[in-house]
Amino acid sequence: MNTKDLALILLNTGESFFTSWAFMKAGNMEPGNLLTGVIFLLAFFLYRHISLRLSAKTFAYTRTARRCAIVLAAVYAMFYMLMDYRRYIATLTSRLYQIVVLSAVFVGFFICFYKLLLLLFSYSGDKKTLARFLYRLGGGGCPVPGHLCLYCFAGCLLCWLPYFLYQYPGVMTPDSINQLEQALGVIGYNNHHPFVHTMIFSLFYHAGYFLFGDMTAAVSLYTFFQMCFLAFSIYYLLKTLERYCVRPYILVIITLFYALVPYHAVFAVTVWKDIPFAAVVMLFGCSIFRMVMKQGPAEIGMFVFSGIMICLLRSNGWYGFLFCVPFLLYAYRRQAGRMFPAIAGIVLTAALVKYPVMNILHVTQPDLIESLSIPTQQIAAVLCNDRELDSEQRALVEHVIDTTYIKELYNPGFADNMKELVRAGDQAYLAAHKWEYFKLWAQLGMAYPADYLRAYIDQTCGYWYPDSFYLVAEGEGVSATKLGVSHKPLIRGPVVVKVKEIALKMGGMLPMYGLLWSMGVAFCFLLFCIANAFVRQEKEKLILYLPSFALYLTVMIATPVATDFRYVYFMVFSVPFYLMAALVEIGGCEKQRMKEADAADNVQEKNND
């Protein structure tokens, strides 16, 4: 054994030690637990394997790959540290020991993620080997059946049908009932739940009532439309991947993700704006992916349609799209003649609907406090921690809210209590003195940054922390209402109920499968795909992830709930799109590349002979 090998073994031993320390703390294990030794050995042999592989795959250890791995590993490690650091040092009173333990745990997490990311980049960055693997995995030269994508569309609907029959006419929460009331004219129009989505619901409701003469059946027509629209977005994804010669077996596997993971079925029959919004986000990404190869009327038409719907189906969609506009203009600067009018058309159409049209129709806009969830929570955290405020600051607070019961009402992960407290006070004064309250927020943030940071973590953790637990797709039936719509299941019985219950609980019981139920994991995956574009030197792919990333940022700025799956369902729904966009070569065809690769191999073999 030479000196270099010995040094590498010692390095891997140290890395494994810190990794086992981090996992010991994360798993709440004692140092003498046998599993810490198991983790140490597993980490040691894994790191040895990674070191040997990277020495053979030098391209995977380029400066870009190392930088991406360093940044991403630090981000992933910080996710765990921000949420759990208090638990890691709960039994320690010495500040020095606390710093040592926290530093060791961070180093352990960082090393683990850094090594694993380099390993993954060594596969995802090897374009030729990866193309060959995907080609053979998908059935070699097996052609895609002509109607496979259509069969997948029908397969999704078929797998979702039992949920539709059980939840008939669909899952309707209080938000859904509010939109039904608007459609019936019981209350005035408001844009708290997007007006355009309410109008789409109203269109199908009134068409259904005209056809069937029954309110419940009328609602079911919209629900069935939503199922078809969601399935169509999946069909469009598969047809897009088919253009890139992705093989049929892979398309079927993607379909199974949508057809069999039960929260897709539950959301498909839930009357929420978040569901069609998720569909249009993926349609928008697929249209961009298609336009790499062809910018025909169909592709541009889908780009414009889905872009307008992104702006109108959720309030944050409008701000997310505006964030994307400069990047879209830059990306399509060489196709300005076609794409600039399309982008301008999206913005102008959405602005026309959101402002003049809604004003003419007297659509009430959401109140100011609705978009101030996080600042409200941060100021409330300062008050609940009994921090000192000067007389002017306290007067501003008490002019808007009654602070008597603020400690009882404050919930770190749920902003609605604080928003209702503001609504019960003098919100008009807040709206009239926005600058003064902005200064108050900034002053308290500079005075008590730890309180602000803790409040922000508590308010957003479910969207980035991979180990958050939350109920997904637990909605059922129709919320209490006197409008004449009720839950009338077409299939029922204890067996149906138990099967549904088990299906939804499996995500919280099975390892690996449970990753599909985590918003934090989905976000980490999105970050990996973005980094992978840099590693593969395919920066043109970044535009594919931009819409989802921009929309995610809007959630992180204004989320009212820390762990609501539907707010980022668009991101979870698009995970297969992210994966395939990361793996295929943009603008290329797998089959053609394989022919070229095989031809090059044959020439090389003849030259060697």
Image: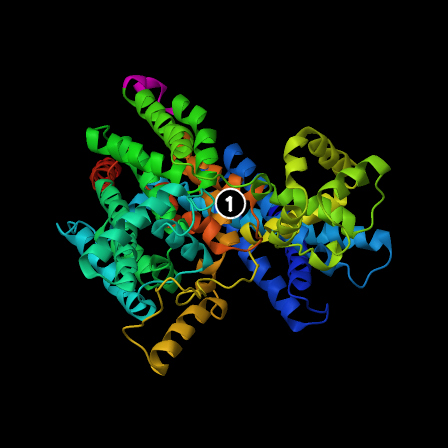
Mark yes or no: residue 537 visible: no
Q: How many marks?
A: 1
Q: Which residues are magenta?
A: 331-337
Given residues 212 and 128, the one toward you in this image is 212
- Give, as a three-letter code, the residue at label 1: Leu
Q: Position of residue 429 (x, y in %)?
A: 68, 36
Mark yes or no: residue 407 visible: yes
The residue at 26%/52% (across/down) is 206
Given residues 51 and 104, the one toward you in this image is 104
Q: Position of residue 83 (x, y in %)?
A: 66, 54
Given residues 37 and 376, the one toward you in this image is 376
Q: Position of residue 532 (x, y in %)?
A: 45, 40
Where is mark 1, residue-wise? Answer: 118
Q: How is the image coloured?
A: rainbow
Give the farthest residue toward the front: 186
The residue at 25%/32% (across/down) is 301
The prevailing secondary structure element of the residues shown in magenta is helix
Given residues 250 and 554, the one toward you in this image is 554
Q: Secondary structure at mark 1?
A: helix
Q: Position of residue 292 (x, y in %)?
A: 29, 31
Disc 1 packing (10 Å; few <14; some 14–19; many ≥20): many
Q: Is residue 268 magenta?
A: no
Q: In the drawing, does residue 12 fall left or right of residue 264?
A: right
The residue at 46%/53% (across/down) is 566
Q: Is residue 336 magenta?
A: yes
Give residue 536's quadrant in the image: top left
